[in-house]
Image (cartoon, rainbow, N blue to C red):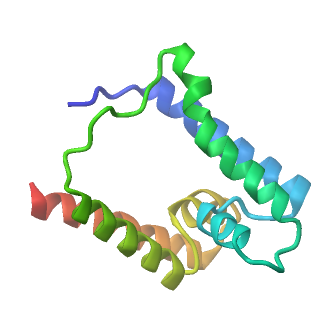
Amino acid sequence: MTQFTPIEALLGGTILGTASLLFLLFNGRIAGISSIISGSFKPLSSQPQWRWVFILGLICSPLIASPLGYSLPSTIDLSWSAIILGGFLVGFGSYYGSGCTSGHGICGIGRLSPRSIVATIIFMFVAIMTVFILN
C-alpha cells in the first residue's frame, strides 16, 4: 500500500496550482491536458509548438524527479485490453465533459467555473463509487 505523504502532496498541489496560474496569466490559456494534447494534432492550431513543449515537459518530468528519489510505478497489474478500454473511456469522457480532470479540477475550480465544479464533483463521485464497487 502506498504511504500517505502530506508534505509532498501539499508541495505538489502548490506547484500544480502555481504553474496553472502562471500558464493562464502569461499565455491566456487553461492548462488542461486533454485540450493541449488534442490541439497539438490540429493542423490549423495557433502556436502548436508550445503544446509540444508542454507535452515534452510532461514526458521528461520523471527523468528530472528520478534523481530526487521519486519514481513511476514499475508494474501495472492490468491487461492491455483493460488499459486500452480505460484510455478510451477517459478520452471519451474528456471529450464529452469538455475537459479532463486537470482542466476542470485544477484550472476550472481555480477560476470558480460552475461547470468545472460540477464536473469535478461528478469525477470524484464516480471514482469513489468505482473503488467501492471494485473493493
Point 50% across, 74% down: residue: 94
Question: Is 93 above or below relative to 86?
Answer: below
- Left or right, 76 with respect to 68, comes to left
- Left or right, 123 with respect to 132, comes to right
Point 36% across, 63% down: residue: 124
Q: How many marks?
A: 0
- Left or right, 77 with respect to 46, comes to left
Point 47% across, 67% down: residue: 120
In the rendered image, is residue 24 in sight? no
On the rendered image, what quadrant is the C terminus found in? bottom left
From the viewer's side, name the closer residue of 27 and 74. 74
Point 46% across, 73% down: residue: 91
Kindly indicate the quadrant of the structure image that contains residue 24.
bottom right
Q: Position of residue 55 (x, y in %)?
A: 67, 51
Q: Position of residue 76 (x, y in %)?
A: 26, 43
Q: Position of residue 106 (x, y in %)?
A: 60, 56
In the rendered image, is residue 133 in sight? yes
Q: Position of residue 68 (x, y in %)?
A: 55, 15
Question: Is 8 above or below relative to 92?
Answer: above
- Left or right, 77 with respect to 110, comes to left
Question: Is 88 above or below relative to 101?
Answer: below
On the rendered image, what quadrant is the N terminus found in? top left
Kindly indicate the quadrant of the structure image that contains residue 83.
bottom left
From the viewer's side, name the closer residue of 89 and 112. 89
